[in-house]
């Protein structure tokens, strides 16, 4: 059996670029800084920079986390701040958010030694906005969502294939069809933390905390 401990300790960290992070020059609200970092990650070729970990808790307080795709970031001029993602209401994450509409998001871009963490209440969009988001998805994703069986036991692969084919045929006949349980969600952050790694371990951490309609920034120990 492989001894993982020494192997893990030998793996490199902070092997890529470690950009500067001047905390004295940050904007007054976190959306501007997030957008700037996201654009830097895209320009740097970070794989799937819009992937993020969504953490929720169920009615009993048990946590779950999974990776989703960021749909949009709302700024002060378009109803923000807000980080948007979508869920099927019948999925585990959908049920978690129905029981406890509060969540955390984490973005990790190791090529830039950067991490961003958010937490706050989650607000569902109206049916029209959710339907618009659903129709913007690719055909395979829409067909799967029409079935609405995410995370349920799969005991009949052939039956799944038949049902999925039927869902695709339905979409071919009616491209505007929507899964009624599809929900566009917006996390309204109460706290956003930006973390910039350094090769010398003198990491830079900055937190934004909501204070009414304004934001308070605070430098944190690494």
Image: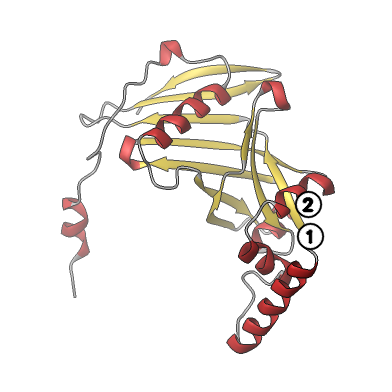
Q: Residues within 10 Å of mark 2 (few under 14, many from 20)?
A: many
Q: CA distance from mark 2 to mark 1?
A: 6 Å
* Other residues around mark 1 within 10 Å, as few (<14) / some (14–19) / many (≥20): some
| Residue 117 drawn at (x, y percent) | 50, 37
Q: Residue at x 64, y 82 (%)?
A: 160
Colour mapping used in the image: secondary structure
- Image-quadrant location for residue 71: top right
- The image quadrant where one finds the C terminus is top left
Q: Nearer the viewer, residue 180 or 57?
A: 180
Residue in front for this viewpoint, 58 or 104: 104
| Residue shown at 20% from the left, 46% from the top | 12
Q: Residue at x 47, y 41 (%)?
A: 107
> Total number of numbered labels?
2
Tell me whether the residue at label 2 lies in contact with that at label 1, contact meaning CB atoms closer than 8 angstroms.
Answer: yes
Q: Earlier in the sequence, mark 2 or mark 1?
A: 2
Please identify the residue farthest to the front as the structure is shown. 173
Q: Is residue 201 above or below residue 63?
A: above
Q: Quadrant of the N terminus?
A: bottom left
Q: Compare residues 29 and 5 and report the one nearer the observer.
A: 29
Would residue 106 be found to the left or right of residue 17 on screen?
right
Q: Residue at x 72, y 48 (%)?
A: 184
Relative image position of residue 70 (x, y in whole percent):
57, 44
- Quadrant hosting residue 76: top right
Residue beneath disc 2 = 131
Give the x, y percent position of residue 88.
71, 59
| Residue behind mark 1 | 178
């Amino acid at each position: 059996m492989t001894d993982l401990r020494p192997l893990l300790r030998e793996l490199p960290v902070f092997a890529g670029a470690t950009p500067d992070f001047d905390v004295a020059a940050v904007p007054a609200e976190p959306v501007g800084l997030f957008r700037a970092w996201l654009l830097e990650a895209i320009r740097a070729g970070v794989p799937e920079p819009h992937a993020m970990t969504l953490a929720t808790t169920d009615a009993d307080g048990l946590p779950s986390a999974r990776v989703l795709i960021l749909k949009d970031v709302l700024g002060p001029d378009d109803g923000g701040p807000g980080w948007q993602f979508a869920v099927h209401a019948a999925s585990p994450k959908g049920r978690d958010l129905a029981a406890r509409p509060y969540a955390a998001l984490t973005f990790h871009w190791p090529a830039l030694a950067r991490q961003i963490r958010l937490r706050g209440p989650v607000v569902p969009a109206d049916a029209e906005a959710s339907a618009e988001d659903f129709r913007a998805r690719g055909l395979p994703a829409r067909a799967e969502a029409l079935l609405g069986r995410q995370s349920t036991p799969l005991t009949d692969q052939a039956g799944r294939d038949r049902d999925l084919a039927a869902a695709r045929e339905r979409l071919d006949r009616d491209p505007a069809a929507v899964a009624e349980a599809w929900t566009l969600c917006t996390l309204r952050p109460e706290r956003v933390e930006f973390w910039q790694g350094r090769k010398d371990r003198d990491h830079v951490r900055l937190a934004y905390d909501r204070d009414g309609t304004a934001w308070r920034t605070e430098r944190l120990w690494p």
